[in-house]
């Protein structure tokens, strides 16, 4: 056998690259410590069943991530396997096997049990004088102790999945603070919505009142009799005429006052008066005279136009009356 050959000093087979874990075994190794902690009384095969049921419920996206990791490591494994098969040690081992020795079956680099990787026990290179039975006994004893340790309930959890109590308390405080902040924001949002709805209702009510009042004002048309209207026009015309007369009298008083002051100034300082006000006063007098002439012309022209319009109206009325008489005679 291969063990006997190793015991008699035959060449030892080089260690091949480890095969990549399939997606399910990756998931099992990741979830093993958590499931074991949640089901401390369960046996090894029960935990395997639980993880198998969990794997069926895993989403396709998460399975795709495990498959992607597996494919990447598989490509690396194939490259490493090609390099291993082309290595000098492996070629020498193959040549020795072809030289008449029984071919040794290549064992897997590791054995997966429930997410725990069991490494095979290497033979001692210097202990070549041991018999095949002795080597088998040593291997059995070592593997038996390893399996016993694996199936024991005293398991050291993965430190990556352990969270300190202080960290948990801190996270709880942060979660409570975030919840309170969220409630506060929701309350503010609700208050803002209530205020907005209240303002909206107020605007709608005021708009309706305004539309109703406008409708009332439009419906209530003010009716003014012609006689009353003429009376009001005459009243305001008289008021405007009185106001204009008051304004005109005030302006005349001011002009008289300024003229008296200028006369006093001319008597006291004739030279200064001629240099500063004399020429301007003459120009202003001429200007006022021209404006007065224009006003008189407008009055005369206005009276003429009014007389002309009255004559035209009278002629038109006479023509209408004559036409009506002709029609009645006809």
Image (cartoon, rainbow, N blue to C red):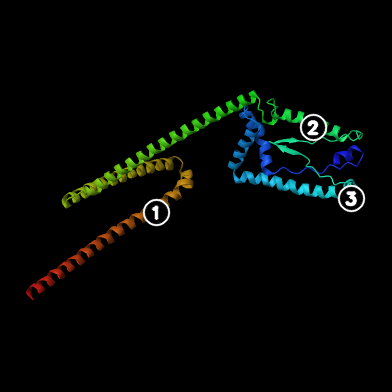
* Disc 3/disc 1 C-alpha distance (Å): 141 Å
Decide: few, some or many residues near mark 3? Use Cα within 10 Å; few <14, some 14-19, many ≥20. few
**Residue under the image location 33 percent in, 43 percent down:** 207
**Who is closer to the viewer here, 35 or 146?**
146
Residue that label 1 marks: 287
Mark earlier in primary sequence (3, 1): 3
Name the residue that disc number 3 marks. Answer: 98
Q: Is 182 positioned to the left or the right of 287 in the image?
A: right
Residue farthest along the left direction in this orientation: 329
Of 100 and 200, nearer the camera is 100
Q: CA distance from mark 3 to mark 2?
A: 30 Å
Cα separation, mark 2 vs mark 1, equals 140 Å
The numbered disc on residue 140 is: 2
The correct choice, above or below, for 311 with respect to 263 in the image is below
In the rendered structure, the answer to whether residue 91 lies left or right of residue 297 reads right
Image quarter (top left, top right, bottom left or bottom right) of the N terminus = top right
Q: Position of residue 305 (x, y in %)?
A: 26, 63
Q: Position of residue 129 (x, y in %)?
A: 92, 34
Residue at image x 27%, y 44%? 212
Vertical relation: 315 (above or below) 224 = below
């Amino acid at each position: 056998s291969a063990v006997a050959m190793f015991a008699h000093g035959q060449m030892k087979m080089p260690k091949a690259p480890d095969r990549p874990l399939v997606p399910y075994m990756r998931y099992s190794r990741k979830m093993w410590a958590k499931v074991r902690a949640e089901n401390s009384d369960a046996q090894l095969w029960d935990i395997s069943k639980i993880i198998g049921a969990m794997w069926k419920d895993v989403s396709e996206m998460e399975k795709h991530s495990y498959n992607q990791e597996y494919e990447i490591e598989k490509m690396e494994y194939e490259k490493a396997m090609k390099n291993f098969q082309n290595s000098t040690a492996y070629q020498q081992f193959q040549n020795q096997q072809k030289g008449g020795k029984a071919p040794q079956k290549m064992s897997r680099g590791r054995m997966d049990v429930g997410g725990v990787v069991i490494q095979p026990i290497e033979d001692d290179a210097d202990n070549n004088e041991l018999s095949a039975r002795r080597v088998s006994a040593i291997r059995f004893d070592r593997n038996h102790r390893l399996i016993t340790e694996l199936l024991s309930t005293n398991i050291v959890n993965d430190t990556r999945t352990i969270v300190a109590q202080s960290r948990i308390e801190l996270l709880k405080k942060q979660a409570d603070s975030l919840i309170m902040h969220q409630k506060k924001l929701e309350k503010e949002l609700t208050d803002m919505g209530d205020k907005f709805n209240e303002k909206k209702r107020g605007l709608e009510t005021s708009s309706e009142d305004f539309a109703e009042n406008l409708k009332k004002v439009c419906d209530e048309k003010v009716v003014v009799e012609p006689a009353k209207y003429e009376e009001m026009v005459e009243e305001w015309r008289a008021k405007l005429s009185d106001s204009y007369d008051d304004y005109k009298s005030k302006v005349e008083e001011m002009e008289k006052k300024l003229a008296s002051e200028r006369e006093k100034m001319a008597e006291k300082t004739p030279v200064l008066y001629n240099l500063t006000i004399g020429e301007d006063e003459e120009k202003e007098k001429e200007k006022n005279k021209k404006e007065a002439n224009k006003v008189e012309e407008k009055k005369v022209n206005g009276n003429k136009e009014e007389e002309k319009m009255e004559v035209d109206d009278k002629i038109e009325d006479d023509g209408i009356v004559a036409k009506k008489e002709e029609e009645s005679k006809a």
